[in-house]
């Protein structure tokens, strides 16, 4: 079995043996292709809320999904009852669903989608695997809880005239995911990843108004990350955000030149462009990018990539949940839209190669076309040089939420923002909300810094939530509509 693991649960051997034992059933079922996707997730989280409630939450889940292809039609079924009898029933359902899909298909005798062979592809793959130097189990529950309790004491000791802390909520913990795939052609592969997550939220009441500060850090790694990102450092940043909000002046609504940080760049790359490049939205015609392949959508500065490679701060996905190795995809190069993100079936629809973008929250659900690490590439400028280009404008750091539409328009609120005057950052601003369309925004990017930073967040699609990476460089953008609401 090809292995891309940095962690492996003891239960993995049992699940793999179930899959290997049942693959013969599929091999004798007169299907064109079939595979079993197995997965285990283990989560442990220490939590603190309402300033004085705390505890430990643990979750364990295992499941196996079965994908069957008949004449280009797919059937999918799954089970979380990890017994051979339950697995056999799920296999029968998957075959039944594939036959039903074939009977309802308008086009008969389709050619089989290009099934990637892991063994033949592996010699072309080069992966930089993340390293874990301290496993999550090496730190006890009491130590995790004490980190939260000590951070709470630090927050309560802070002084700010005329304010009262009304709520503190924090979490710190680890999520470990293991996946394997076994197909009827004898291909086998496994992967795993561990995520560290710490978040901190503080709410205070000051001058009869409520102010919230929130900080979150999610990274691939183990307990060693607690020394770099202990809860009290996130608490300090969340409190600092509140202090800035209290002092901040409201921005004037209108057109502004802006500089966006890597986190906000990543939100644009993911939410406003990446989703629109997922091939299932192209097939339905709902995406703004439908029919725009090969067309210029941005300035020469703009290049956007999606990859499963372990990039600075992003996720690690060596192969997807259909067994396709995670090849990098250039979505935009020098402003030209070049490629879609594909699963096996969407690639078959367009006569293209699968890109390794079929992902699922768990094997209980069928894979969907999803992003991995989606980000803007850097350019030739130093960060300080952007202030010379945008001498009067707004610096935006992070996103506090928003939404994007299939027509390419979007609205995102800045988490923190600052006025730029004569090339210097002079004061914090509040209520900064960006309203634009993706083609206008990309066309107005005039510069980008060399260095690229990625972040990890959660993305939901069709009720499936997965980890994704997003990011980019600092970027200078001209003539952007900013609302001061």
Image (cartoon, helix red, strand yellow):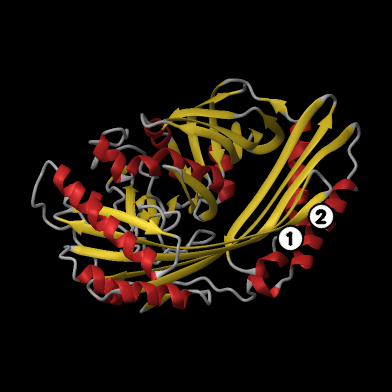
Q: Can you give x and y, in whole percent of width and height, for residue 437 in the image?
A: 41, 29
- In the structure shown, which secondary structural element does the residue marked by tag 2 occupy? helix
Q: In the rendered view, does 98 fall on the left or right side of 243?
A: left
Q: Is residue 327 visible?
A: no
Q: Nearer the viewer, residue 253 or 116?
A: 116
Q: Can you give x and y, in whole percent of width and height, for residue 351 in the image?
A: 16, 51
- In the structure shown, which secondary structural element does the residue marked by tag 1 occupy? loop
Residue for badge 1: 230
The answer to whether marks 1 and 2 mark residues whose Cβ atoms lie closer than 8 Å is: yes
Tell me if mark 1 has few (under 14), some (14-19) or many (20+) residues whose alpha carbon lies within 10 angstroms of its own.
some
Q: Nearer the viewer, residue 404 or 166?
A: 166
Q: Nearer the viewer, residue 89 or 39?
A: 89
Relative to 186, is 43 above or below? above
Q: CA distance from mark 1 to mark 2?
A: 9 Å
Task: Using the rendered view, name the quadrant where residue 295 is placed.
Answer: top left
Residue ID at (32%, 35%)? 287
Q: In the rendered view, does 56 fall on the left or right side of 94?
A: right
Task: Using the rendered view, name the quadrant where residue 417 is placed.
Answer: top right
Residue ID at (49%, 46%)? 459
Residue ID at (33%, 55%)? 77
Residue for badge 2: 151
Task: Using the rendered view, name the quadrant where residue 427 is placed.
Answer: top right
Quarter holding the N terminus is bottom left
Mark 1 vs 2, N-terminal side: 2
Tell me if mark 2 has few (under 14), some (14-19) or many (20+) residues whose alpha carbon lies within 10 angstroms of its own.
many
Q: Which mark is residue 370?
A: none
Q: Can you give x and y, in whole percent of width and height, for residue 273 in the image?
A: 39, 40
Residue ID at (23%, 54%)? 96
Q: Can you give x and y, in whole percent of width and height, for residue 343 in the image?
A: 29, 53
Relative to 260, is 365 above or below? below
Quarter holding the C terminus is top right
């Amino acid at each position: 079995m090809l292995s891309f693991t940095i962690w492996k649960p003891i239960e993995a051997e049992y699940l793999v043996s179930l899959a290997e034992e049942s693959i013969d059933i599929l091999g004798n079922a007169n299907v064109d292709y079939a595979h079993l996707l197995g997965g285990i997730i283990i989560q442990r989280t220490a939590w603190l809320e309402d300033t004085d409630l705390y505890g430990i939450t643990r979750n364990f889940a295992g499941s196996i999904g079965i994908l069957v292809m008949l004449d280009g039609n797919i059937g999918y079924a799954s089970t979380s009852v990890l017994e051979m009898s339950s697995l056999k029933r799920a296999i029968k359902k998957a075959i039944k669903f594939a036959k039903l899909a074939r009977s309802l298909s308008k086009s008969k005798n389709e050619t089989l989608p290009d099934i990637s062979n892991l063994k033949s592809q592996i010699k072309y793959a080069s992966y930089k695997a993340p390293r874990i130097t301290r496993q999550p189990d090496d730190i006890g529950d009491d130590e995790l809880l004490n980190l939260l309790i000590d951070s709470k004491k630090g927050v309560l000791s802070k002084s700010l005239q005329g304010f009262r802390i009304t709520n503190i909520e924090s979490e710190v913990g680890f999520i470990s995911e293991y996946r394997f795939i076994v197909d009827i052609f004898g291909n086998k592969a496994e992967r795993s990843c561990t995520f560290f997550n710490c978040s901190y939220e503080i709410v205070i009441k000051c001058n009869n108004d409520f102010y919230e500060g929130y900080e979150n850090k999610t990274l691939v790694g183990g307990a060693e990350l607690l020394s770099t990102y202990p809860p009290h450092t996130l608490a300090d940043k969340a409190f600092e955000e509140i202090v800035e909000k209290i002092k901040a002046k409201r921005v004037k609504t209108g057109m502004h030149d802006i500089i966006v940080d890597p986190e906000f760049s990543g939100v644009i790359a993911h939410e406003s462009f990446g989703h629109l490049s997922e091939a299932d939205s192209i097939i339905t015609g709902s995406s703004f990018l439908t029919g725009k392949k090969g067309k210029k959508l941005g300035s020469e500065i703009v290049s956007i990539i999606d990859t499963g490679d372990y990039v600075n701060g992003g996720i690690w996905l060596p192969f997807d949940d259909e067994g396709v190795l995670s090849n990098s995809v250039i979505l935009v190069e020098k402003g030209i839209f070049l490629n879609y993100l594909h699963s096996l079936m969407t690639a078959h629809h367009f006569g293209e190669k699968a890109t390794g973008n079929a992902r699922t929250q768990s094997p209980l659900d069928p894979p969907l076309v999803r992003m991995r690490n989606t980000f803007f590439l850097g350019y030739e400028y130093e960060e300080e040089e952007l202030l010379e280009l945008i001498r009067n404008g707004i610096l935006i750091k992070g996103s506090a939420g928003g939404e994007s539409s299939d027509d390419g328009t979007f609205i995102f609120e800045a988490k923190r923002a600052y006025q730029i005057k004569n090339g210097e950052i002079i004061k914090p601003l509040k209520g900064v909300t960006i309203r634009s369309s993706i083609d206008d925004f990309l066309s107005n990017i005039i510069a980008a810094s060399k260095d690229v930073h990625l972040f990890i967040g959660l993305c939901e699609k069709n009720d499936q939530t997965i980890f994704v990476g997003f990011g980019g460089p600092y970027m200078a953008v001209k003539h952007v509509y900013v609302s001061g609401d």
